[in-house]
Amino acid sequence: MLEAEAAARDPFPDGGDGTFLDRQTGFRWTAASQPAGAGGWIWTEANSYCERLSLGGSADWRLPSQEELDRVLRRIDVGRYAWDCCTLWSASRPAGIADRLWVELPTSSVGSPQWSFEVRDISGRRFAHRAVCVSEASR
């Protein structure tokens, strides 16, 4: 009984299908960042991955906006759903800047996400980061 009550109060219940629900917003999120393993994707690869994704009964996946990603990152334990590994792409762009935003995840639950918008390092190479996807279709 206590276990069922705790599950009912969980703000981020696991969907059992590679997704979890954010009860506060009603959005579904991918439980793991992609690509798995070392490395990452440039923004266009991350965006294409989310747009092609069909998971958890939803086919309307996309990269999250800065606001959506920031909102969930400030409330979730990033290690719970394997987001604590990396930097993540966002779909947002700062006003007047062509580059896309990405976030460096906090290393502890008390840290704040650190946002950056450069997509090239000083040597001119394109940055590669991972992606988590969001769907507005809650179940």
Image (cartoon, helix red, strand yellow):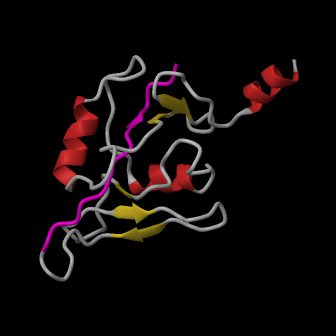
Residue at 74% of width from left, 26% of height from top?
7
Q: Quadrant of the N terminus?
A: top right
- Image x and y of residue 94, in percent: 31, 67
> 123 or 73: nearer the eye?
123
Residue at the spot 22% in from the left edge and 52% down from the top edge: 41
Q: Residue furthest bottom?
A: 122
Number of marks in picture? 0
- Based on the picture, tell me whether residue 127 belongs to the magenta stretch: yes
The relative height of residue 54 versus residue 10 in the rendered view (above or below) is: above
Residue at the far front: name it.
37
The magenta stretch spans which residues? 125-139
Among the 4 quarters of the image, the one containing residue 104 = bottom left
Q: Residue at x 47, y 22 (%)?
A: 17
On screen, residue 14 versus residue 121, left or right, reads right
Q: Position of residue 82 (x, y in %)?
A: 50, 45
Which residue sits furthest right? 2
* 64 relative position to 4: left or right: left
- Residue 58 in percent (x, y) is at 37, 21
Q: Residue at x 40, y 63 (%)?
A: 103
Give percent across and percent down for residue 91: 30, 52
